[in-house]
Amino acid sequence: MYKPTIAVVGRPNVGKSTLFNRIIGERKAIVEDTPGVTRDRLYATGDWLNYEFNVIDTGGIEIKDEPFQEQIKMQAEIAILEADVIMMIVNGREGVTNDDLFVARILQQSKKPVVLAVNKIDNFEMRSDIYEFYELGLGDPYPVSGSHGLGLGDVLDQAVEHFKNIETDVAEDDSVRVSLIGRPNVGKSSLVNAILGEERVIVSDVAGTTRDAIDTDYHYDGEHYKLVDTAGMRKRGKVYEATEKYSVLRANRAIERSDVVLVILDGEEGIIEQDKRIAGLAHEAGRAILIVVNKWDAVKKDDNTMKKFEDQVRQEFQFLDYAPVAFVSALKGSRLPTLFPLIRLANESHKKRVQSSTLNEVLVDSVSMNPTPTDKGRRLNIFYGTQVSVGPPTFVLFVNDVELMHFSYRRYLENQLRKAFDFTGSPIHIISRKRN
Ligand code: GDP
Ligand code: GDP
């Protein structure tokens, strides 16, 4: 199912992040100990009237040292590129400002639907303050109060109304969705071009759709793949392409729509913190992952170079110990044929189902080789395990006391399952649950 996106725009201090937090509610991201991943709440999921959607707080994306007007222009442009519906926020206590008019003009030029929320209308008496905002030419202004949680329902009703006009008939087929993520300049678009052959990435927007994401079909060895968001790889030549927050946002959006994620690294420049953050997003989302070291042509090599680089990858990306590493050159087209067999393997792992009987044999053997931990005289007892889902494979173990399942023992069991079933390229989740 296609998940629509709302972007919140407006000048600083009108209440964008307050409203953003209201929209996403108390939804807390699953906290996981992934080194190098700090969460910022720039992009999250919300729902309203049975619609699930993404929300972007464009106010969180900044370019350093750019004048104020450039900043809000950039934020409006990102909203236009990424969103299906734009929510413009203004401050009802200040009235219409020149900056509001400036943003409104940019939004008007796009064909994206806009809903206009007049914030800081904290009580009923203030409602008459909203009428002057008709001047923005963005339709009816809606009074809201982010801090009091008032009026947001009407604005979301309006947004959801626009969702109904989006073509959501994303063809559900049997293709494996593959995306390439990585910081700017690691060679993502070059790689997509090299894989597809020539300049096929330069695709035009399909008329009639409001979505920017366009995928490209690819067949390999009798299987159907889709390279996700190849259109998004087009060079837009904008300053914000290079900002870290925007590149993280793009990575998030690509990950969300894929089965297998290729984390692209720059072999020439080596690994930096930003690579870890981006890889961490794919890991947290539970996607199948392949690490691809690009620009291998530009690296001075001896017999040991590849091994050394791989050791470094293992060291820096310990949380991705299940991901295979491939070395390629988009520029020379070399070693590209190594990619698809690995993509296929990772995808198979990601969708693998193991029989309960075999699973439980492995669990029994694992426990007899390495007895379960005890705490204050009580021993962990694993009664039974079952696989509850795929993509990634997720196992529920019924135990006497979940507190007794220590991290290190769970890790041990994960390794045993990996040895028995081979989940190369895929994370696996193990959840313990108390048997009643
Ligand atoms: P942003 O810069 O647009 O993201 O704005 P913030 O969400 O950070 O809010 C800016 C300031 O306005 C903060 O001090 C908020 O507490 C305040 N604020 C936000 N919403 C409301 C509201 O509905 N009423 C009032 N009175 N203040 C608000
Ligand atoms: P993106 O921002 O991740 O999409 O990166 P691009 O595909 O635009 O590539 C960034 C730069 O790296 C360009 O100048 C490319 O020519 C260069 N580049 C990409 N792949 C390779 C490669 O395999 N080897 C070398 N030497 N340069 C490459």
Image (cartoon, helix red, strand yellow):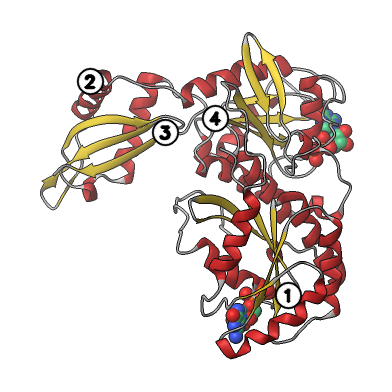
Looking at the image, which is closer to me, 290 or 325? Answer: 290
Looking at the image, which is closer to me, 244 or 391? Answer: 391
Between disc 1 and disc 2, the foreground one is 1
Figure quadrant of the N terminus: top right
Q: CA distance from mark 3 to mark 1?
A: 42 Å
Q: Secondary structure at mark 1?
A: loop
Q: CA distance from mark 3 to mark 2?
A: 18 Å
Q: Secondary structure at mark 2?
A: helix
User: Looking at mark 1, is its residue's CB closer than 8 Å to ligand 1?
Assistant: yes
Q: CA distance from mark 3 to mark 4?
A: 12 Å
Q: Secondary structure at mark 4?
A: loop
Q: Earlier in the sequence, mark 3 or mark 1?
A: 1
Amino acid at dot 3: Ile
User: Looking at mark 4, is its residue's CB closer than 8 Å to ligand 2?
Assistant: no
Q: Earlier in the sequence, mark 1 or mark 2?
A: 1
Residue appearing at x 50%, y 33% in the figure: 321
In the picture of the structure, the residue carrying the numbered disc 1 is: 12
Contact, CB < 8 Å: mark 4 with mark 1?
A: no
Amino acid at dot 2: Glu
In the picture of the structure, the residue carrying the numbered disc 2 is: 361
In the picture of the structure, the residue carrying the numbered disc 4 is: 323
Q: Quadrant of residue 156?
A: bottom right
Judge from the rendering whether residue 352 lies leftward or rightward of residue 108; answer left or right. Answer: left
User: Looking at mark 3, is its residue's CB closer than 8 Å to ligand 2?
Assistant: no
Q: Residue furthest top?
A: 222
Q: Which percent across, then down, holds residue 103? A: 82, 68
Q: Which mark is residue 428?
A: 3
Q: Which percent across, then down, holds residue 250? A: 69, 46
Q: Earlier in the sequence, mark 3 or mark 4?
A: 4
Residue appearing at x 45%, y 32% in the figure: 392
